[in-house]
Image: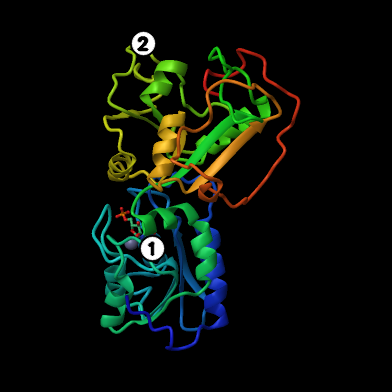
Amino acid sequence: MTTATAGPTVRPAETDAMRRALELAATDGLVLGPNPRVGCVLLDADGATIAEGFHRGAGTPHAETVALANARAAAGPDAARGATAVVTLEPCAHTGRTGPCAQALVDAGVGRVVFAQPDPNLVATGGGALLHAAGVDVVGGVLGDEARTLNAVWTRAMELGRPVVTWKVAASLDGRTAAADGTSRWITSAAARADVHRLRASCDTVLVGTGTVAADDPSLTVRDADLTGPQPLRAVMGRRELPPSSRLAVPADDGTETLHLRTHDPREALEALWAADRRHVLLEGGATLAAAFWRAGLVDEMVAYVAPVLLGAGPAAVGDLGITTIAGAARLDVVDVALLAAGTPGTPGTAGADG
Ligand code: AOF
Ligand code: ZN
């Protein structure tokens, strides 16, 4: 990508417009699906706003096209001629669900484009170069960090070329996920289980192994948290058939989808999920599956719910990681710690089998 960062300096009105575009992109209640949040503001030569737009989610027009349409609706077909487009993401150069925005900006006669984040999507990138080649002034990187933060998971997934994987564990203080006889209700508190539902709601996929389905019959749905979009996809990995009466084998009446990935290879599973437009997978069990992902280097983040409970025996949270000596220990960085209402173990029957 060629971005003329050494070109004309960025005017204060353009930085202000970028702040506004970021605000538009961050609009509440959007159902983004696999797409990023994007906002766009069109400025005239005096730095006054001509029109604004933002992207509402996969399958809907991109922010730039929305802003151009709003400009035309307000001031006629030439409304954006000579304008400056301020966009939170490098305009796309591809024809996907919609046409290339970079070309639409050229066709509209936009004279200058200021964007925040270069497009990390290899399929769509190239808009900066296209604009530059068409004689448009292009400046990238304006409030780039803010834009990247706004789409942190999406950006990471695009850079990795696979969904981001968050591994969730709920265990006793001694790292066990069930007692010796297999009973596991309720190790963690009701507050911890509610937090799991918020975590699920922030992911587009929940992944477990066939063993977990057979052992726990989880429902893997978001019940205890706000959900703007559809329920996360329930993905099950492994070659074993799902027990026909299990919650995941029975079609859900609310449209919740289940996908059985008949493989034991984490990489293959993520490829299939990527092909299904998934960006953020919550790995929820069990120990063998978690170990397989860990050993493949495919865990990006871990969320551990640790209950002040001792079991002394019972299955461990993760299987063999191939670590034989302390020098080989997997050491993680602590990003955040929170105390979730200790001392409120749930009442059996108040949540599903998978809280
Ligand atoms: C968006 N909204 O406002 C912009 C995007 O599948 P498509 O055709 O909607 O294309 C999605 C890609 O287009 C996306 O990953 C990003 O690279 C680029 N720009 N996408 O969803 C927008 N400007
Ligand atoms: Zn676009």
Q: Is residue 303 above or below residue 245?
A: below
Q: Nearer the viewer, mark 1 or mark 2?
A: 2
At label 1, the amino acid type is Ala
Q: Position of residue 203 (x, y in %)?
A: 47, 40
Q: In what element is the residue under mark 2?
A: loop
Write the residue at 29% across / 44% down.
271
- In this rendering, position of residue 147 left or right of residue 259: right
At label 2, the amino acid type is Ser
Please give the residue where the numbered disc 2 appears in the rendered image.
Answer: 245
Q: Position of residue 238 (x, y in %)?
A: 31, 28
Image quarter (top left, top right, bottom left or bottom right) of the C terminus: top right
Cα distance in 3D space between marks 1 and 2: 55 Å
Write the residue at 43% across / 76% down.
140
Please give the residue where the numbered disc 1 appears in the rendered image.
Answer: 73
Q: Nearer the viewer, residue 227 or 111?
A: 227
Q: Is residue 292 above or below residue 103?
A: above
Write the residue at 60% across / 31% down.
175
Of the residues under marks 1 and 2, which one precedes in the sequence?
1
Which residue is farthest front?
325
Write the residue at 31% across / 44% down.
267
Tell me if the residue at label 1 has its CB under 8 Å from ligand 1: no
Which residue is farthest left?
95
Q: Position of residue 261 (x, y in %)?
A: 29, 31
Q: Position of residue 303 (x, y in %)?
A: 57, 40
